[in-house]
Every structure is written in structure tokens, then in C-alpha cells.
Image (tube, rainbow, N blue to C red):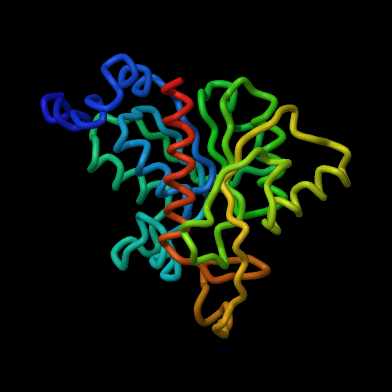
Amino acid sequence: MELEKGLFTRTELLLGKDIMEKIASQRVMIVGVGGVGSWCAESLVRSGFRHITLVDSDRVCITNINRQLMATTKTVGQIKVEALKTRLLEINPSVEIEAVQQIYSTETSGQFRLETCDYIIDAIDSLKDKAQLILDACRTKAVFFSSMGAALKIDPSKVQTAEFWKVKGCPLAAALRRKFKRLRTFPARKFQCVFSEELLTNRGVYPSQEEEEPCSNKAQINGTAVHITAIFGFTLAGLVMRNVCR
């Protein structure tokens, strides 16, 4: 496609033609395209990745607008993966994007062909579903990266990466480790995570779910800031890029 010729000139200048060809051939699945996963997808498409699978069951909610890439006043009510797909195709119309409106869970995991992926990115919020994806992804040959909790944070300098069992100060990581120990079932291999040790408390008072969060069934809602969720997403994309460049 003529338009695509100049899209990645600056990236190819940095990485070289051979790496760009390798990037274009990789198949990436992003599970969860909210405040973290949506920015990861954006970064990957802008970097030349051409085969992306987006997995999320939700629709865009008004309260997503503060942090999710595809969430605007015009997309409220739309299926998240479809709204994000539209956005990404505006960046590069040649990208092959599979939009899957589905929860990744114990019950649905058999519907996903994880073994066909080169990279699997976990940006799931639910503890139970996140644990299932971690166990399943670590049984495949795909390179796997996971986002830990990005809420209740505001300091970008504290975002870092570490192997899962070495993540410190993150309640979500601690809860996952307790779950695996309780089940006596553990990830088959080590994997890198994005996390932050910062943990603030909500200073505001959240209105009733019926009034303000019509499309959320979360038991607990915490405050979030876009510069943190986006940094988490971009860091995940950076881990993928660094791995491809090896």
C-alpha cells in the first residue's frame, strides 16, 4: 500500500529493515483493552506490528474516558474492541486486527488459540481471570508479559518491571501469588511484569454505581490516572519491542 511506505521510516531508521520485517510478522494477543491494554495496542501498531488480536468483553463507558485510548464522548456504548480496532486501522489500514468481544476465563479459555501467538499480553483486571490467563499463557511457547495493578498511583518514576515472583509492593501481585499457592498450581515458567510500588488511597468519595458506573460490575473501584495506565501500556509494548530486537 502506497500510504504505508512512509509510516515507519523513523522506526526503521532506528531498528533496521530486518527487525522491521520481523516485527511485521509477529502475532500479538492483548487480553484486556482498558486503560493499560489500549495504549499497549496503540504503541505496537505505531511500531509496525501488523497482526493483533484484541480481547475484551466490555463496552465503552463514560467513566473510561479519563484513561482509555478509544474512549471518547462519541464512542460511549460501543464495543471496546471494535472502537479500538477502528482507531488502530486509522493509524495503519493494512493491520490485521481480530476483535474478540469475550471474557477470558476458565469457562472460555478453550475458545482462544494461545498457541498461535508469538506474544501474549495480560492487561486483565479480574483476579480470577488474570490467574487463568497467566497459567494458560505460561504453558505455551509465546512470550508472555503481564500488567499488575495500575490504580491508586500518580508517580510515573515508580513504574518498573520485574519477574512476577519478585514484584514488590503490589496488592494484585500478592493476591495472585496467594491464589496460586492456595490452589497449589503455579505458572509453568517465569515472566516479566509491569508494576509500581506506589499505593495511594482514594481521597474522593465515589457516587453510587447506579448513578456513575452503569457498565461496571466491579466489587471495588479505585481511582486511576491516564499518565500511569498509559505508561504501563507503553512499557508492556516496550518489553515486546525489546524482545523482538534481541
Residues 147 and 72: in front is: 147
Q: Is residue 24 left or right of residue 101?
A: left
Image label count = 0
Residue at x 30% of width, y 30% of height: 48
Q: Is residue 116 above or below residue 122?
A: above
Q: Is residue 191 left or right of residue 159?
A: right
Q: Is residue 66 above or below residue 87?
A: below
Q: Position of residue 180 (x, y in %)?
A: 81, 43
Residue at x 19% of width, y 32% of height: 7
The quarter holding residue 66 reads bottom left
Judged from this view, the residue extending furthest toward the left is 2
The quarter holding residue 78 reads bottom left
Tell me if I can see residue 107 in this picture.
no
Q: Is residue 222 above or below residue 180?
A: below
Q: Is residue 74 above or below residue 134?
A: below
Q: Is residue 30 left or right of residue 200?
A: left
Q: Position of residue 41 (x, y in %)?
A: 40, 42
Quadrant where the image shows the N terminus? top left
Tell me if I can see residue 170 in this picture.
yes
Residue at x 31% of width, y 21% of height: 20
Residue at x 39% of width, y 66% of height: 65
Residues 140 and 204: in front is: 204
Residues 79 and 231: in front is: 231
Q: Position of residue 156 (x, y in %)?
A: 46, 58
Judged from this view, the residue extending furthest toward the top is 18
